Image (cartoon, grey):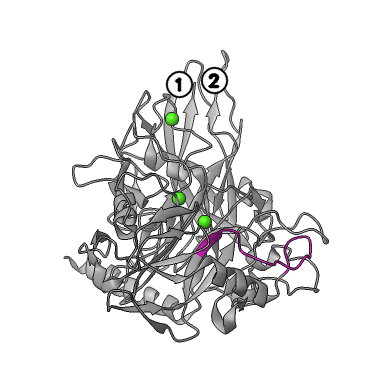
Amino acid sequence: MNTRSLVLLANATLTAAALAQASPDFLVTYSQPQQTLSGSAGTVLQFLYPNEIAHLEWSNGPCASMSAEKWAPRTCFQTMAGDENSDGLFWNPTLFGKIDALVDVPVAGSPIGALANARTVFWSPSVDMGIGVSGGPGLRAGDVGRIIRNTAFQDGQVEYYMRREDFNSALGLPLNTVIDVDAIAWAPGMGVYFSLDQDVFAFPACGPTIIRDGDIICVPEPMLTYTWDMRIQSVTPNSAHVVYTEAQVDAMVANAGVADRFGNCIPNAVDLESLEIDWNAQAAVIPGCTGLVVHRPHFIFSTETMTGAGLLTTIGGGSIYNATCAPAATPCGGGPTLGWQMGIQPVNAALGAPSFVNAITFTRSVRYSMEPQVHVATNPIGGLPFGWQNVDISSPFPFNIIVWTTAPVGVNTVAQSFANPFWMLTHPDFYPMPTIWTSCLTAGGFATWPMLALPPGFTGNVVFQAVGFSTFGSIEFSTPMTLEIQ
Ligand SMILES: [Ca+2]
Ligand SMILES: [Ca+2]
Ligand SMILES: [Ca+2]
């Protein structure tokens, strides 16, 4: 390691330490298309989709910026995934269906790894990703994983946090049972906690039972083995314990006295939709059925009934989660839960946002995302003029340089990425031989640049990234985007 690397590492440690003192951020997904509370300076980044991840940033000036902002656009995932569904296009607006579970697992002792990015966070889709690039089994609705470049330098590959087979094994189900994991959380030293999207008859530790979609299930720590980077390597069969039954979750929702987006009191859960550990109260120890101690921490959670994007906690037998800035839902009788408390716009002052919170994870992250207005375009006979569309950036840096590089075209292709050696905070990869196209200044956290003119006859895929320079010397890349010209 040379002197420069040591300086970078020291600075990264300081940065992470500074961030660690502040409140953690949430990464969050919503069940329906939503609009950011801020309006994101009028950019396309204001439109949040259920297969994208948004960022509720409380670590920098908590309550001044309650808006959820786009953290991982669809085009970022698509550039990482390539033509996963074998139709010859990268762009697939329904990639993943919805992101219905999220977990962030910082690798112990790594200050850099402690800052989440689209390569490090794990998610579960509601619809299986295609296997055209990754090969089988791919990222299925019953998996929690991420898209990586593997050690053989192949992009668009899947790395699992926990596989469908492992969830099935812990539940005592045949390993090939089709399931959909729709909430997950991890508590160090306690285990993995999750919930399913459908009821299923299973054989967990306490014997045959119907696992309900509102149950919170634990695979206790002693029943797990980990990889070096804290992913789940294996589970003990029939080791899952239900730590909260659906009936208990129903009771906690009722006890919380929380309003939905119409202002009606919510009587039950129906389906548990998101989970994160709530460290504001001590975990309980409950007897396991195999003589094992099972930990039951408190949870921040949402359910299918909680429109207006409210959040509850299991503390106090079920109560409205008190986020850093404000209660994360409206109490019963106080009007509708609007959505602004989770950073999104209500329909109007009397009708909240349609979404429930579909996935949440606490994390620390610096957001640097980029998205075009048009993802796939036809180049007409005369070519396309300068500024034929604009591209928008959400940027923490005052100045951005825009770089581009061509990417392969055709069935099952994917763009090749490389590790950015000067990275510390944002997207860790760049795409090869980047050519400088233009630059733009950031105002109020957002920037926009006009797309280059395209000569007649030009077709192909182009990957763009923005490059920013941090105050302590790292060179940072935005999330990548692909433009497909036909
Ligand atoms: Ca495709
Ligand atoms: Ca899922
Ligand atoms: Ca969910």
User: Which corner quadrant of the figure contains ligand 1?
Assistant: top left
Looking at this view, name the residue that lies furthest to the right. Answer: 350
Q: Which mark is residue 3?
A: none
**Left or right of residue 389: residue 112:** left
Residue 260 is covered by the magenta coloring: yes
Q: Which mark is residue 459?
A: 1
Q: Which residue corresponds to mark 2?
A: 379
Question: What's drawn in magenta, residue-wise?
Answer: 259-274
Q: Amino acid at mark 2?
A: Asn
Q: Secondary structure at mark 2?
A: loop
Along the line of sight, which residue is nearer the eye, 150 or 211? 211
Residue 199 lies, in percent from the top left, at 49, 53
Q: Quadrant of residue 152?
A: top left
Along the line of sight, which residue is nearer the eye, 377 or 269? 269
Residue 138 lies, in percent from the top left, at 33, 41
Question: Would you place residue 451 above or below residue 357 in this image?
Answer: above
**Does ligand 1 reach within 8 Å of label 1's beta carbon?**
no
Q: Quadrant of residue 69?
A: bottom right
Q: Quadrant of residue 319?
A: bottom right
**Left or right of residue 230: residue 92:** right
Residue 63 is covered by the magenta coloring: no
